[in-house]
Amino acid sequence: MPTPFEPAALRRALVIKLRHHGDVLLASPVLTALKTAAPQCEIDALVYADTAPMLSGHPALAQLFTIDRHWKHQGPLAQLTAEARLLSALRARRHDLVIHLSVHRRGAWLTRLLRPRWSVAPRYTGRFWAKSFTHFYPAQSHPERHTVESNLDALRALGLEPAEEDKRVTLVPGPEAEARIDALLAQHGLVAGSFIHLHPASRWLFKCWPAEHFAALMDRLSAQGWPLVVTAAPEAKEKALVAEILARRAVSRAPTFDLAGQLTLKELAALTARARLFVGVDSAPMHIAAAQGTPTVAIFGPSGNKEWHPWQVAHRVVASDRHPCRPCGKDGCEGSKVSACLTELPVEAVWIACESLLAEAA
């Protein structure tokens, strides 16, 4: 029998989420809800270094520890030194509780080495995993439940039921990012609420709507007089997609500003917080927009919109109803990296969603 969890006895907790940007952001309510349940507790988090902006500045966060994915490319000695330094820093915190929010094996090893009084993780196979934690929650949530609720099952396994107000996703842009975006908007003659933010790309191209479709949508928005701001990550393939979209554009009635590859994640959050509407595919920027409270049009292909839709914000999900195979979760049809449920998704469907949300926000 696991030791009964005592929130009042909790001094320090460590939340581990070793996944991609959007996954880390959707884990932020766990910090909020745990702080409400144990206000005296110092809550730390461990994430990959590139995803740290998703949690840094969170009001419930005490310390943020990171793992650099490049350690393994720096040679065995350098990697071992970095890993030892991290373990020493974590041990110094003497965590009473470890919450591991994935089935990453590193979390099991760390929990064994840190030896907290309580530990919780998704239920998984193998004796090693079963002996690494004191509490478990279902690894596979019901496909009708959102990922935020699945993450919060870790707290439910400890006997804590999060309040509705603690389930909001939190991302704090910070004063530096806010100042840069305010300066950029002023430079381009834009004010908050006067423009539409579009982020057409994803690190996974099989999640992307075709360039010609995005170009046609932007033409229609521009014809209505909306200034447009388009963004993408610094990766070459994402910037190339934006360049192709812009090359396919007709003459614009309203200006379009290309900021592809020019913003940090914090700056992206500050920008989208000032937009009247966000339009994008299933990706981290879509979740960032929702976290900022910006009405969101989310274009879904092979991924499951029930699990990943914009959380607790006015939104419209646009997905094909002509492809019964979706959501398949595959990297394109038969591994082709091209998803028919996206290539065949008409511009009109996304346009109607944009019109609807813009009317609500008026």
Image (tube, rainbow, N blue to C red):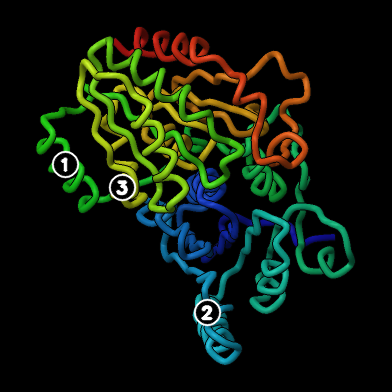
Crowding around mark 2 (Cα neighbors within 10 Å: few <14, some 14 to 19, many 20+) is some
- Specify the amino acid type for callout 1: Leu
Kindly state the secondary structure of the residue where label 2 is placed: helix
Q: How far across and how far down the image is residue 109, in percent? A: 71, 74
Identify residue for label 1.
184
Give the Cα separation between the discs numbered 1 and 3: 15 Å
* Whether residue 36 can be seen here: no
Q: Is residue 19 left or right of residue 165?
A: right
Above or below, comparing residue 299 to residue 135 in the picture: above
Q: Is residue 298 left or right of residue 174?
A: right
- Specify the amino acid type for callout 2: Leu
Instruction: Please report the residue visible at 53 percent of the width from the left and 88 percent of the height from the top.
Output: 78
Quarter assignment of residue 187: top left
Q: How far across and how far down the image is residue 172, in percent? A: 34, 47
Above or below, comparing residue 155 to residue 74 in the picture: above
Q: Which mark is residue 173?
A: 3
